[in-house]
Amino acid sequence: MKLTSLDRPFWLVFLLLIFRPCTAQAHDPGLSSATIVLGDSRIEVLVGLAIKDAESLSSNNGNPLTLRTSVELALIKAQLEALTASEFQLRFDDVIAVPEQVIASLKDGQNVDVLLTFRRTGAARLRLVSSLFEKLPFGHREFVSVQLANRTTLTEAMLSAKDNSLEVDLPTGPLPTASANQSHSFLTFLVLGIEHILTGYDHLLFLFALLVVCRDLRSIATVITCFTLAHSITLALAALDIVKLSPRIVEPMIAASIAYVGIENLIRGDAPKWRWVITFSFGLVHGLGFADALKEFGIGSGQFGIVLPLVGFNLGVEIGQLSVAAIVLPILWQLRRHPIFVRRWVPACSALVALAGSYWMIERIAQ
């Protein structure tokens, strides 16, 4: 088949869109949390890891690990505790602190908590250095919150492999006001929501598959509105622990939704009837996936207030989603003016979307 001048650039762009996530990460590269609570005589650090990350940090004589029960956790408990204690360091005025106690436990069947207890010294400055990033997937991030015993937040930060340390002056004066802490939390989770949707390749591909067959502004507005409303509902319900569904079920379902939309585009052509019903239904599933990002670092567990982080994260997701749509839609509208795009490349795009979704679904079921 000979490629026209229209075919070549579009083919290259779409290959990048499809195969970049397949060779890198099909979903968000991971989030963890660390809540540091400063007491009068002790400092407690609660490190929260998603099960998939705890599994990747540990090994059971080279055998694959599945941490679904306390019995399975017991097999690598000592190894995980030792690794966290050595790779997650607290330094008081540049002196490395040795934890008095390290305890790993399974939480809600979805996360692993590692509690480290340190004796507090008279140091004026605390520094955290985390080298866990070297053992976790590329792009992994860690949300760190430093709090007083009454849960007043001193500072928060999002750490990564490029920025893996945090310093804070230990308080000697008045406590910070609650309003400042809440504002900072809102902005932090707003940025987190934007980052999550921009790195969530499967969510973006699902949105692309919906938009590629839309022929007018009304159909586009309906699709985006239904998707937004649906995932906002389940994001809130899951973050509040009203709805609970394991990521081992949610992640394959998200991939299946991508495959289904791609296949439906091929079978039913442009602007399939009742597309808003499909969009809303699968949007509920994607909302559970968004909620996992919040649950992985303690939202809804009492470590953070629930309302402002939830609103901030959801708003961030919408900002990221609309930003992508604002870039993609004008390109699609221009391309749809060419009959060859509608006749040849819309079906080709849909076929590749279906293949990518099927690949991710099989991969996630097999994990």
Image (spheres, rainbow, N blue to C red):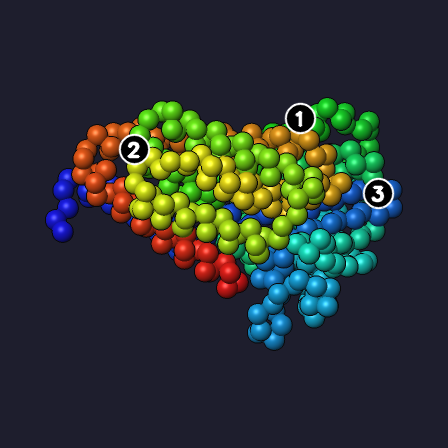
Q: Position of residue 18 (x, y in %)?
A: 35, 49
What amino acid does circle 2 point to?
A: Leu
Q: Is residue 9 above or below residue 90?
A: above
Lateral position of residue 9 relative to residue 132, left or right: left
Residue 182 spot, x, y in % from top left: 70, 28
Residue type marked 3: Gly
Q: Is residue 78 above or below residue 90?
A: below
Considering the numbered disc 1 on the image, is that residue within a helix, a strand or a loop?
A: helix
Q: Residue at x 50, y 37 (%)?
A: 280
Q: Which secondary structure lies at badge 3?
A: loop
Q: Residue at left 49%, top 48%?
A: 254
Farthest residue toward the left?
Answer: 2
How crowded is the residue under tag 3: few (<14 C-alpha within 10 Å), some, or many (20+)? some
Determine which of the numbered discs, if any, sits on residue 183 in the image.
Answer: 1
Callout 1 amino acid? Ser
Residue sitting at 69 percent across and 56 percent down? 109
The residue at 67%/30% (across/down) is: 308
- Of the two numbered discs 3 and 1 on the same chain, state the one appearing first in sequence: 3
Counting from the top left corner in percent of width and height, residue 253 is at: 51, 51
| Disc number for residue 332 | 2
Q: Earlier in the sequence, mark 1 or mark 2?
A: 1
Q: Quadrant of residue 184?
A: top right
Query: Is residue 259 shown to the viewer in this render?
Result: yes
Q: Residue furthest bottom?
A: 61
Residue under circle 3? 39
Q: Nearer the viewer, residue 23 or 148?
A: 23
Q: Nearer the viewer, residue 271 or 37?
A: 271
